[in-house]
Image (cartoon, rainbow, N blue to C red):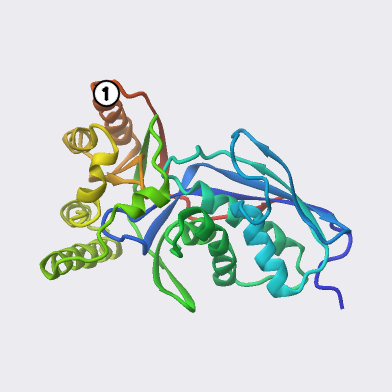
Amino acid sequence: MSLLKSGINQLSAFAPATSANLGVGFDIMGLALDAVGDTVTLTKRNDGQIVIEKINSISGLPLEPNKNTASYALQKMCEELRITCGFSLQIDKGIALGSGMGGSAASAVAAVVALNGFLVNPVSREKLVEFALYGEEIASGGRHADNVAPSVFGGITLIRNLEPIEVINLPYPELYCVIIHPHLQVETKGARGILSPTVALKKYVEQSAQLAATVCALYTKDIELLRRAMQDLIIEPQRAALVTGYYAVKQAALDAGAISATFSGSGPSLLAFCANQAQAEVVAQAMLAAFQAHAIAADHWISPINPHGAYLIA
């Protein structure tokens, strides 16, 4: 019996950009954005090879199948499921390289979601996270699902466990996300490499309290508690120097009414939570002005949280 549906030779999937960590949840929390994402198109081959035919919008990404996040995740999924046909990939990058918006994760997710569409018996979303993690691992140097999980599941996710994977979709109030991407590049491997491997017990206790309070605030939709709780006491102080003017931009966001402001993933982008779109517009302009004061150009996106995650394109 064939593992793949008959009569289908090509499928495309879209995976949304994400913001990881959310300040309080290093490596375990993330959210999906509606603003941008990556698309991967798979075309069946008869030679059993995984081949990247084309990458649009961005130059400099590896074309070797074992070095590209999309092709490597696809390759691992084919190996485990014993799929013997090959695939050509076209990758359409909507997420800027090194932007802190989960670009490597989105490409990997889009690839495995597209392959899942070929299957007679599709795998679970948890299994898709596991396969996409192979791609994320070669990009970041670590096995963490805080971008992959929200890109697959949508919404705000909490990763309770990696082996086996357990993802919890958290409820949340109406929130608008402001993503500010300064024209700086921070590679995930480098941003992770500067972090101390140990944390003082006092800081651990303080940060655990903020994480617990943040989860409570999301469940109860308590904006004021969310405002007090979303503090990064451990990672942010170590990474702030990677982005010129970081604290000035963060303060500008808070002064303009943002609920919180912090790194989006490993940076250099910043994420600000806002209660509505009008407030988000004001916050975005304040953050852009703060970067301009440091002679740094930046792009921005305003997005509600994407509740759906990755999907096949009809």
Does residue 224 lie above or below 198 as drawn? above
Q: Quadrant of residue 252?
A: top left
Q: Which of these two is toward me, 191 or 169?
A: 191
Look at 50% across and 39% down and name the residue there.
97
Could you tell whether 161 is left or right of 67 in the image? Answer: left
Does residue 10 lie above or below 217 as drawn? above
| Pointer 1 residue | 289
Q: Which of these two is toward me, 163 or 61?
A: 61
Q: Which of these two is toward me, 214 or 307?
A: 214
At mark 1, the secondary structure is helix
Q: Is residue 308 visible?
A: no
Q: What is the x, y in percent for residue 42?
A: 75, 52
In this view, which residue lies farthest toward the left? 202
Look at 20% across and 57% down and name the residue there.
234
Question: Which amino acid type is shown beneath numbered disc 1?
Answer: Ala
Could you tell whether 56 is left or right of 290 in the image? Answer: right
* Quarter of the image with the N terminus in it: bottom right
Look at 23% across and 46% down and name the residue there.
260
Q: What is the x, y in percent for residue 187?
A: 42, 45
Does residue 156 lie above or below 277 as drawn? below
Q: Quadrant of residue 192?
A: bottom left
